[in-house]
Image: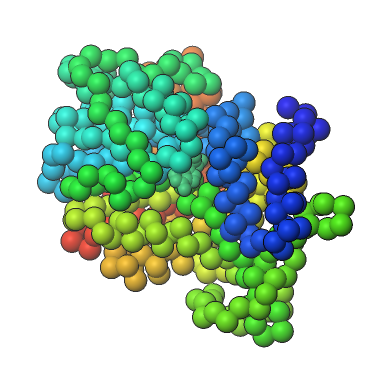
């Protein structure tokens, strides 16, 4: 889509936002973000083609199958550490195209009993993406026969496998013997049946709306989205707030921006309400330490765009502030491991060894496998900016590789 066509696509939502702002006044950033994403007619998540090389942005499981496989093997090892409970609720928050879960289930199938114990629960807001996940996972089976080749133990006791998916960009679903996996979709974690649970969330939290507060003359004010006389959207400083906020260490400078994400509190409360044992893995981009700053961003067709320019047509997200997430998790009675960088997390799970085995078993695809893994680990890209953090019921020990 050219940018002009993108602007055309954004026009209906832009017109509605403008009218709403002219009528009722500027809206807080979290409301703007929510409308851009979830508007029932023109919200971004109503589109199925957002994720992947042909969409607006690409995520780790779409870059390399090794990512989902390592997460799947990690889940199986955590399950073993829980005492191999059955049923196990294997939950994914914001599964996108379903690629991570598909690769995870294929890999975790090498661990005896895991697929028989697991029931899969996908928390997904988008009807279009639910349909795509259903398609991706349709042929995933509880495997009846032993895995085809090359199992062993990799770094951190994580099993390794050498099975390569059919060619990218999006290989057909896993074909296998045995009964289909039970997969259920949910609006929130609260409706997933109780019982031992492992939760995985890759690039989910960054999509939850944020409020932005601006520090003006010694007080916090709401940052809002206004519309000028021509109808163009722009940021403005809204009402002064009588609010007690957790702030990063130092005194805020004039104009400092503080970002708050209430959706995280909800997810953590839902986790804390579950009967033990349960453990969640969050992988997302953002700083480990507490900081101020405006991190609202938007991508369209793999390029940064002004977050106010293409409402409903660009993916609007913001950094996850892991220090704040950890503090809130502990306040909810949960234990926290990490965060650690994605490079460190995947490195300690044995990504290099796994990739080497995969390349040796599939020499014709070695270059492509190597490039994908390098992207996940790059110090100037996903390897450092992305972090992994586990949140668990305190009765469980820290999971690998955090021990
Ligand atoms: N985890 C996937 C996709 C990340 S994109 C991957 O790594 O490829 C964010 C995902 O979260 C999408 O599937 C989106 O529809 C979903 N999502 C965003 N907000 C949500 C919410 N409030 N509830 C449920 N799903 C949500």
Which residue occupies the foreground of this view, 356 or 236? 236
Left or right placement of residue 179 versus residue 68 in this view: left
Q: Residue at x 75, y 45 (%)?
A: 15
* Residue 60, position as x, y percentages in the image: 49, 37
* Residue 312, position as x, y percentages in the image: 65, 41
Q: Residue at x 70, y 54 (%)?
A: 20
- Toward the front, the furthest residue is 23
Say which quarter of the image contains residue 337: bottom left
Count of all numbered marks drawn on residues in the image: 0
Which residue occupies the foreground of this view, 31 or 169? 31
Q: How is the image coloured?
A: rainbow
Q: In the picture, which quadrant includes the N terminus? A: top right
Say which quarter of the image contains residue 46: top right
Q: In the picture, which quadrant includes the C terminus? A: bottom left
Q: Residue at x 18, y 61 (%)?
A: 395
* Residue 380, position as x, y percentages in the image: 61, 48
Q: Residue at x 39, y 19 (%)?
A: 173
Q: In this picture, is 237 found above or below 112?
A: below
Is residue 316 visible in this depiction of the protein? yes
């Amino acid at each position: 889509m050219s940018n002009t066509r993108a602007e055309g696509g954004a026009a209906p939502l832009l017109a509605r936002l403008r009218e709403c702002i002219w009528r009722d006044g500027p809206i807080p950033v979290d409301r703007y973000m929510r409308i851009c994403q979830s508007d029932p007619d023109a919200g971004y998540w109503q589109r199925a083609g957002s994720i992947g090389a042909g969409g607006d942005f690409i995520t780790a499981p779409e870059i390399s199958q090794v990512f989902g496989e390592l997460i799947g093997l990690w889940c199986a090892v955590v399950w073993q550490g829980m005492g191999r409970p059955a049923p196990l609720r294997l939950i994914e928050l914001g599964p996108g195209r379903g690629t991570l879960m598909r690769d995870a289930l294929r890999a975790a199938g090498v661990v005896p009993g895991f697929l028989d114990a697991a029931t899969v629960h996908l928390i997904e807001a988008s009807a279009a993406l639910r349909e795509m996940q259903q398609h991706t996972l349709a042929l995933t089976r509880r495997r009846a026969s032993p895995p085809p080749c090359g199992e062993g133990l990799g770094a951190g006791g994580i099993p390794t496998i050498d099975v390569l998916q059919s060619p990218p960009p999006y290989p057909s679903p896993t074909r296998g013997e045995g009964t289909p996996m039970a997969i259920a979709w949910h609006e929130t974690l609260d409706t997933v049946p109780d019982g031992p649970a492992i939760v995985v969330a890759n690039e989910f939290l960054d999509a939850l709306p944020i409020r932005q507060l601006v520090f003006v003359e010694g007080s916090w004010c709401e940052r809002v989205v206004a519309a000028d006389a021509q109808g163009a959207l722009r940021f403005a400083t809204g009402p002064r707030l009588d609010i007690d906020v957790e702030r990063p260490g130092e005194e805020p400078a004039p104009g400092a921006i503080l970002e708050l994400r209430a959706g995280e509190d909800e997810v953590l409360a839902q986790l804390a309400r579950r009967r033990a044992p349960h453990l969640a893995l969050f992988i997302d981009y953002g700083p480990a330490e507490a900081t101020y700053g405006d991190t609202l961003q938007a991508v369209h067709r793999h390029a940064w765009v002004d977050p106010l320019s293409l409402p409903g047509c660009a993916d609007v997200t913001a950094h996850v502030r892991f220090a704040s997430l950890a503090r809130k998790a502990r306040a909810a009675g949960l234990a926290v491991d990490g965060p650690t960088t994605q490079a460190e997390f995947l490195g300690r799970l044995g990504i290099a060894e796994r990739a080497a085995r995969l390349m040796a078993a599939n020499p014709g695809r070695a270059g492509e496998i190597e490039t994908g893994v390098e992207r996940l680990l790059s110090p100037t890209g996903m390897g450092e900016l992305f972090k992994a953090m586990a949140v668990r019921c305190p009765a469980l020990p820290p999971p690998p590789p955090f021990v």
